[in-house]
Structures are given as structure tokens and as C-alpha cells.
Amino acid sequence: MKKILSICFCLLITTLGAAQSTHLEGDVNISLNNRELNSDFWITNYAPEQMTISFMLNSDIKIKAVTLNTGKIATEKTKTSCYDCHVYEVKLPRKLTLSDTIGIQTKGSFKSFKAGTNKKDYKGKIANNYGILRASEQAKWYPVLTSEEDNLPSFARKHAYTYSLKVNCADCKGIYVGAGVPQKSGSLFVAKRATKDIMLIAGDISWTEGSNAIFINVADEKMRGKLDGLFSSIAAYYEKLTQIEMPTKYVLAHLPSDNKRWGGFMTYPTIVSVRKSFGNRGLAAYLSHEVAHYLFGDVYQAESNLFWFYLESFAEYFSYKYLLEHEPDAMHSDYKRFKNSQAFIRLDQVNTFNDVSGSYRYLIGPFQLLALEERIGEAKMLELIKTVYPKLATSKDGYKALIDSLAEIGIAKETIDEVEEKLFKAFHIEEYQFVETLLRADKK
């Protein structure tokens, strides 16, 4: 009897949890030939306390109408900063209830680039490259509810939705939304688990399902086999390290872009390569970083003034750990660049998100974390991760959160003082000699 009651209670909690998720329903109509992206969206199960709601939408998408149930309501474009998007404010005639429906009707356009011309492409753009339309969650192709209280850069402010989206595209070979296997025009894409990441891919695409991943536009069967094996190896390593179950299947999409300085991105569970072609070089480093973003981005949420450090440096730190275990040769070039880098900054002196440069977040920061682990041990590093990330939602000072967390997990004050002095407040190359020892050991 107790077991039955326990099961019923768990089911009730699960049901209540699902019922509390904001739901996004929509009819999405795409025309590649006409470069149009027109949609009708309906948001339900959302009842904030305030008498206004705000949402972000890509700057190439215009609002035709906003409704509360059946009646139109006024909408204003605000002056709030938003990369490649606008923030809109809706003044409500009354407080919302969970049964209310907010309708947002949109009319959008996108650019179709000739081969070799989209050299400033990046994740926040809606773009048709090489016959494939790409729109990540950062591109705000659907309305994203937001709050000015979010302790995040504007582009990273996301609202989690369950969703049910019907997508039509008569001139597309296939359509992919969110997760799973691509479908044909007119298909319904459903997510019962709330997610902050909804990726849209539509156009001239092919796809194949492997044992560990779904591949979009990866034609080479031998390459798919290698990639599938890498996904299995990386996920197994991270699961053993963290005791956190990794997703059963990632989606790897090859969506070529003309920005030579851009390698790809992740919109969980979609890993996107934007390079012109797939090659064997750097695959383990690339995939181990992107897969780590399930942990640092989804499980552990990056916030505070050190947003980039907590998002990218920790993901690359896990990537380095995987490479040192499985493919240490891939570390040599990074370590050489690290020793010659001039990108060191003091985390305790960071004021804004972008003070943490690209070179720091992808190179200096990860090696600092490896050096921190060398001093306190792997078990304490994992404990640190579990301790510091929950603090970030309420702390604007990410460095203080880090130092406080070290003390909280039992690291001695003299060790913390030494870590601050020799790793975080100054650059001393001799503190990283252990990496050379690890790399030399592999050669024996």
C-alpha cells in the first residue's frame, strides 16, 4: 500500500510540474523562395504577478497583432538592449490566469545569402545559407518571454516552454524543430519537457539516425560512424565523472556558413557545425566541448558578471579533461597558445559580461580550472561545481561566489589565498607545469 501511495504521489508531482510549464503553441509557415517566416503563436499557462509582460523577438520579424484570449491588446517596442532583436512590452487589462491565452501573430523575413557572402554570420542571425534556413533560440524566431531582472546578457535570457508547433514549408526537403528526427512539411513538433532551446532548420537537408546521434547533412558514412563513436565515448566519460545521465541522443547538424572565424554552436540537444566541410582534425576537441554544454548551460546555469567564464571556461575545462584521458595530442596546440597568450584578466576586477574576452573564456579560464583541480583534487572540483552554480542566480559577483564556494566545501583558507594570488590575480606559467608533465607522460 505504501508503495502504491508513493508511486501515486510521484505521478502527482510529475503532473503538477508539467502543468506549471509555460506552453507555446504555433502555426509556422516558411517560404524559402519568398524568404518569409510567418507565424501565429499562442502562449498559455503563464500568469506572472505584474500587470505587464515582456518578450523578445528577432528584429527581422514584425508583430501583426497581440491578443488576450479573443481581444487585441496594445504592444510597445521598448528601448531595452537586445542583440538582433527587440523587446516588446504588453500592458495587460488585468492579471493573467493560467487559463488565459496570449496570442502573438508575426510576419518575418530572412536573407538568402549567395555562396561565400555571409561572412559575418553568427548564432543570433536568422539566415538561409546554401539552401538551408537556420534559426537558433538566440535568434529569437519565436517570442521569448523575458524579465529585466534576469541576471544575464540579453541574448541569454530564455524562457522554458513545452511546445506544439506545426511547421509548413512547401519548398523544403525537410524540417527540424527542437530535437529528434527531421520531418516533412506540415508535421507537428512536440516537446512535453520544458526547454529553453528551440532550434529551427528547414530546407535542402538530408538526415540519418545513428546509434548515439542523429546526423543532418553528414553524407559520409565512415565519418558518421566515427562521430557516433565519439558521442558514445564522450557521454560515457562525463556520466562516469559527474554521475549525471547524459542525453540519449544528440543531433549533429552540418550547416555551412561563410564566417571563417566561426566553428559552430550548440542549441541543446543540437550541435551545429558551420564549417565548410567535416574533417577528422579536431573532432574530439570540438564535440567534447559542445557535449559539455549540456552540463554547463542546461544542468548548471551560467549567470552573474562572469557569465562567459561559467558557460564556456567550464565546458572547455571538461573538454580538456576528456582529451587528457582519451586524446592528449589534441591538447598540445592549446597549451602552446596558452603559454604565449596575452589574454589574462583578473576575474575579481570584471565588471560586465564582455570583460571576459573570447581568448580568456576559451583558453585562459579552462587552464586555470585545471590548475585549481591540480591543487584541490577532482572530487572537490565536482563538489565546487555543485556548490557555486546555484549561487549565481542571486549573485552578481561571480568571483565572490567562487571564493565563497571554495570555503564552503572545506578548502583551507591558506589554499584559497594561494589560489587567488597565484592563479586568479596573477599569471605565473610555472603554476601550469603539471600540464606538460601530463602530456609528456602520454608519450612514454
Image: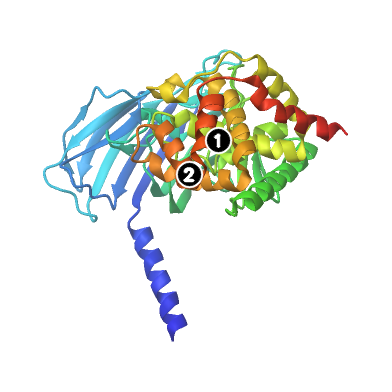
Whether residue 24 sits left or right of residue 206 in the image: it is left
C-alpha gap between disc 2 and disc 1: 10 Å
Q: Nearer the viewer, residue 401 or 155?
A: 401
Residue 300 is labelled as 2
Judged from this view, the residue extending furthest toward the front is 414
Q: Secondary structure at mark 1?
A: helix
Which residue is pictured at 55% across the width and 39% down the height?
Answer: 293
- Tag count: 2
Q: Is residue 172 visible?
A: no
Residue 300, percent from left and from top: 48, 44
In-image side of 96 versus 232 (left or right):
left
Instruction: Give the quarter of the image for residue 63.
Output: top left
Q: Amino acid at mark 2?
A: Tyr
Label 2 CA crowd tier, 10 Å (few <14, some 14–19, many 20+): some
Q: Position of residue 113 (x, y in %)?
A: 53, 18
Q: Earlier in the sequence, mark 2 or mark 1?
A: 2
- When asked about the image quadrant of residue 146, the answer is top left
Q: Residue furthest left?
A: 93
Point out residue 84 in the picture as x, y percentages from the top left corner.
Answer: 38, 22
Residue 427 location, x and y as percent?
58, 19
Q: Residue at x 34, y 59 (%)?
A: 19
The quarter of the rendered structure image containing the C terminus is top right
In which quadrant of the rendered image does the N terminus lie? Answer: bottom left
Callout 2 secondary element: loop
**Which mark, by number, is residue 314?**
1
- The disc labelled 1 sits on which kind of residue? Phe
